[in-house]
């Protein structure tokens, strides 16, 4: 079975600083990876996804992620964060072509 | 286009009571999912459905039942609620389209069992 590990449960950062949220997945033949964001008291919204092709994936709100097969990682980055980026971020991997397996989440707190 | 909607938004139950959560989607999606979200645990899959009339167990199915009588609706039932089922419940759906795995989420239902 696939699994996902988000290496940081909380990441505090100042506004306009860069940020990286780390995600490692268990190895498999075919890997499809996602990052979702959850703003307070809301559902999950897709940030970006990797299905195939270029290993650098760009998403909404200036986020990007890099698929690294040798390190089984899919880290999320943003060069300059805003207060409005404060949220919980989830990394997920497709399992058995049907379900998503989620990591435990990383809380990004952006302060001024 | 409302997307994925969930009813109710909030509910408080006493131990032993029963209830049904309703998920509806208007995107004609084949797949539907129920997750629960607990602090520090991420989202865990309870049950899912790959089409009308079909259901399957996920990671944490005990204490829950589901039904998919209509393609657009996916019901989650708690027959005898327990405090351990206090959680936020999310429904999601996705199309069957080959190579499309993105799931679309509802706003969630916050359930408290006392």
Image: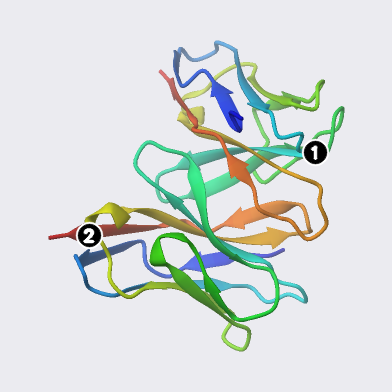
- Residue A21 picture location, percent across and down: 40, 70
Quadrant for the N terminus of chain A, please: bottom right
Quarter of image, res B90: top right
**Is B103 situated left or right of B31 in this image?**
left
Residue at image mark 2: A110
Q: Residue visible at 81% across and 47% down?
A: B96
Q: Nearer the viewer, residue A79 or B89?
A: A79
The residue at the far right in this view is: B53
Q: Nearer the viewer, residue A3 or A79?
A: A79
Query: Which element carries disc 1, helix, strand or loop?
Result: loop
Q: Residue visible at 44% across and 53% down?
A: A37
Q: Is residue B24 visible?
A: yes
The residue at the far front in this view is: B1
**Is B90 situated left or right of B24 in this image?**
left
Badge 2 local density, few (<14 within 10 Å), some, or many (20+)? many
Badge 1 local density, few (<14 within 10 Å), some, or many (20+)? some
Return the chain for callout 1. B
- Residue A22 picture location, percent across and down: 43, 72
Marker disc for residue B30: 1
Query: Which element carries disc 2, helix, strand or loop?
Result: strand
- Residue A8 picture location, percent across and down: 37, 67
Tell me whether the residue at label 2 lies in contact with that at label 1, contact meaning CB atoms closer than 8 angstroms. no
């Amino acid at each position: 079975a696939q699994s996902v590990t988000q290496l940081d449960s909380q990441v505090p950062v100042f506004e306009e600083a860069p940020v990286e949220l780390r995600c490692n997945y268990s190895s498999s033949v075919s890997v499809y990876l996602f990052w979702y964001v959850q703003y307070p008291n809301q559902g999950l919204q897709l940030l970006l996804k990797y299905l195939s092709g270029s290993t650098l994936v760009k998403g909404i709100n200036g986020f990007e992620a890099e698929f690294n097969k040798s390190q089984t990682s899919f880290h999320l980055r943003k060069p300059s964060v805003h207060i409005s980026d404060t949220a919980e971020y989830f990394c997920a991997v497709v399992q058995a072509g049907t379900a998503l397996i989620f990591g435990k989440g990383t809380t990004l707190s952006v302060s001024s | 286009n409302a997307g994925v909607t969930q009813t109710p938004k909030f509910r408080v139950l006493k131990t032993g009571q029963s209830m049904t959560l309703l998920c509806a989607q208007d995107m004609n999606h084949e797949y539907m999912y129920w997750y629960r979200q607990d602090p520090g645990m991420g989202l865990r899959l309870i049950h899912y459905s790959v089409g009308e009339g079909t259901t399957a167990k996920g990671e944490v199915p005990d204490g829950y039942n589901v039904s998919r009588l209509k393609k657009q609706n996916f019901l989650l039932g708690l027959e005898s609620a327990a405090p351990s089922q206090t959680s936020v419940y999310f429904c999601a759906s996705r199309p069957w389209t080959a190579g499309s795995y993105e799931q679309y989420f509802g706003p969630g239902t916050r359930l408290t069992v006392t």
